[in-house]
């Protein structure tokens, strides 16, 4: 140890420097490193969270945009369908109405024809009767005497039928 | 050629030379006697080495910095907090690169070594350190004629040989610094023939690293940490690298060399830092002595760099040795 004296090495001062270092270490650890490193950690955490939040927000925007577009497409499709259905219904209704109208017209025409035919028959029968009557009267007046009414009538009918067949 | 003969250049050169010469004549600086052990300063009845006082100054500087930087911490840092965070984050990143998972554990030691050494080294460059102190009677050999400025005394560059009073043989008299102002300088001093007092300056503060106690203390702490974490990580297997019986004669010799190198590290740690800073201090003394004005300026820049780099080397070497100690010996062959 004597040999170290010219170098200035001294146990007491050496110990003093060691103690000084240890005390400084403890104090700096407490008052400098811990708060600063904690602050750095805290800030790193904050930045990470912010970035994640930003990413989430971006994701949400993308998703909501997608959802909105889907909704829009669906609405368009539905509107298209509704229009389509309405057009089909209208078409069908038109067809039905037309069919009904045609049917009615047909019926009216049929009825009218029936009536006409009936009227004509009626008129024909009446006319035949009257002609028979008339011709009977004319024949009586002309001939002067009467055939028995039954014979007469038979005669006229025969005549009329011949006329009818030829006409 | 014409560039060098440019009148502006000539004027500048002449001015510099003139300043240097005037400085040499007007304010000559004594070349101090240089001694290795720290000088003792009486503080509150104790005799405390000025290098230890210098260490306390560095401590106070660091604690003040810590207090100011963390007093009002903000999420968005400003000013000093920002600067201190930058330093700590940078050093922490470096520690993490080398130490990996153990960064949290080791960082405080590494950072404290770096900060303490660097701040102590840089304080040496502040005017007043090494040049303000107590005037004492010269012990032996050289002394300087004292001049009175107001209530204070200053050393002049006038050097005289002193014989007689051998208080502490082996300790060379005389001390340090440029312009030397100091209180004291009363009776009990030897005088020149024309009655002027002769004294030497004992500075209040002297760079910590110019005292082997400081550098050796750090070296011992570093190597203690290396051994401690080595054992903590590997158990008794840690000592396998020193007492190697498996590797035959060759392995045993390697173990012996490892053991020696472990002690050599203490010595190289302490003398590297001591030698660099002590030499830097001597360099500044000599430059101030030779050319008092202007010439020392670039050397202050150099010493700032040396002060930083030595602190960095001390810290990073400790870290590297720590990282080496926790790895099993067989793995890193």
Image (spheres, coloured by chain):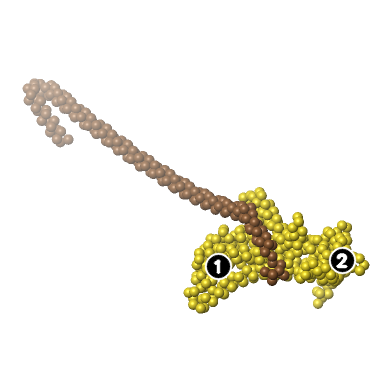
Q: CA distance from mark 2 to mark 1?
A: 58 Å
Work out whether residue B149 or residue A127 is closer to the camera in this orientation and state it.
B149
What residue is drawn where x is 74% and y is 65%?
B38
Q: Which residue is mark 2?
A: B190
What residue is drawn where x is 42% and y is 43%?
A79
Q: Quadrant of the C terminus of chain A?
A: top left
Q: Which residue is mark 1?
A: B324
Q: Identify the mark nearer the N-term, 2 or 1.
A: 2
What residue is drawn where x is 86% and y is 64%?
B189
Secondary structure of the residue carrying numbered label 2: loop
Across and down, in percent, residue B71 comes to: 66, 49
Q: In the figure, the brown chain has which letter?
A: A
Work out whether residue B44 or residue B88 is closer to the camera in this orientation and state it.
B44
The subunit carrying tag 1 is: B
> In the shown orientation, is residue B94 left or right of residue A133?
right
On screen, residue B321 above or below A29: below
Across and down, in percent, residue A120 comes to: 21, 30
Question: In the figure, residue B23 lies in which quadrant?
Answer: bottom right
């Amino acid at each position: 140890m004597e040999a170290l004296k010219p170098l200035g090495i001294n146990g007491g001062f050496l110990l003093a420097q060691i103690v000084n270092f240890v005390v400084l270490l403890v104090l700096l650890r407490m008052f400098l490193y811990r708060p600063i490193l904690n602050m750095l950690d805290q800030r790193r955490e904050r930045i990470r969270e912010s970035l994640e939040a930003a990413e989430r927000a971006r994701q949400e925007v993308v998703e909501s945009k997608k959802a909105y577009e889907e909704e829009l497409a669906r609405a368009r499709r539905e509107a298209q369908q509704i229009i389509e259905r309405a057009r089909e219904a209208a078409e069908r209704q038109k067809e039905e109405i037309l069919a009904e109208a045609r049917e009615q017209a047909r019926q009216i025409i049929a009825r009218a024809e029936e009536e006409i035919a009936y009227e004509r028959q009626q008129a024909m029968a009446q006319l035949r009767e009257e002609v028979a009557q008339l011709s009977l009267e004319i024949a009586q007046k002309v001939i002067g005497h009467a055939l028995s009414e039954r014979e007469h009538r038979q005669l006229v009918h025969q005549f009329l039928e011949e006329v009818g067949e030829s006409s | 050629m014409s560039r060098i003969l440019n009148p502006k250049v000539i004027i500048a050169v002449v001015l510099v030379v003139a300043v240097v010469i005037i400085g040499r004549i007007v304010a000559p600086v004594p070349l101090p006697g240089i001694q290795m052990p720290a000088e003792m300063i009486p503080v509150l009845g104790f005799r405390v080495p000025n290098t230890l006082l210098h260490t306390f100054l560095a401590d106070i500087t660091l604690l003040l910095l810590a207090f100011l930087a963390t007093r009002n911490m903000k999420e968005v840092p400003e000013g000093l907090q920002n600067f201190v965070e930058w330093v700590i984050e940078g050093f922490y990143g470096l520690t993490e690169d080398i130490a990996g998972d153990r960064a949290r554990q080791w960082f405080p030691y590494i950072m404290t070594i770096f900060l303490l050494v660097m701040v102590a080294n840089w304080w040496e460059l502040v005017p007043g350190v090494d040049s303000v102190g107590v005037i004492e009677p010269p012990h032996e050999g050289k002394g300087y004629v004292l001049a009175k400025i107001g209530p204070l005394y200053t050393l002049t560059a006038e050097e005289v040989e002193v014989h007689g009073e051998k208080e502490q043989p082996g300790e060379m008299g005389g001390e340090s610094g440029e312009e030397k102002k100091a209180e004291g300088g009363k009776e009990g001093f030897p005088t020149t023939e024309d009655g002027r007092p002769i004294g030497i300056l004992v500075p209040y503060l002297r760079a910590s690293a110019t005292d082997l106690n400081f550098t050796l203390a750090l070296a011992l702490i570093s190597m203690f940490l290396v051994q401690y974490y080595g054992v903590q990580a590997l158990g008794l297997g840690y000592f396998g690298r020193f007492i190697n019986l498996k590797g035959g004669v060759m392995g045993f010799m390697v173990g012996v060399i490892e053991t020696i190198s472990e002690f050599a590290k203490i010595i190289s740690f302490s003398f590297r830092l001591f030698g660099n800073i002590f030499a830097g201090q001597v360099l500044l003394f000599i430059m101030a002595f030779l050319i008092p004005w202007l010439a020392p300026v670039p050397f202050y820049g150099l010493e700032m760099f040396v002060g930083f780099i030595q602190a960095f080397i001390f810290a990073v070497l400790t870290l590297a040795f720590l990282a080496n100690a926790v790895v099993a010996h067989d793995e890193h062959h």
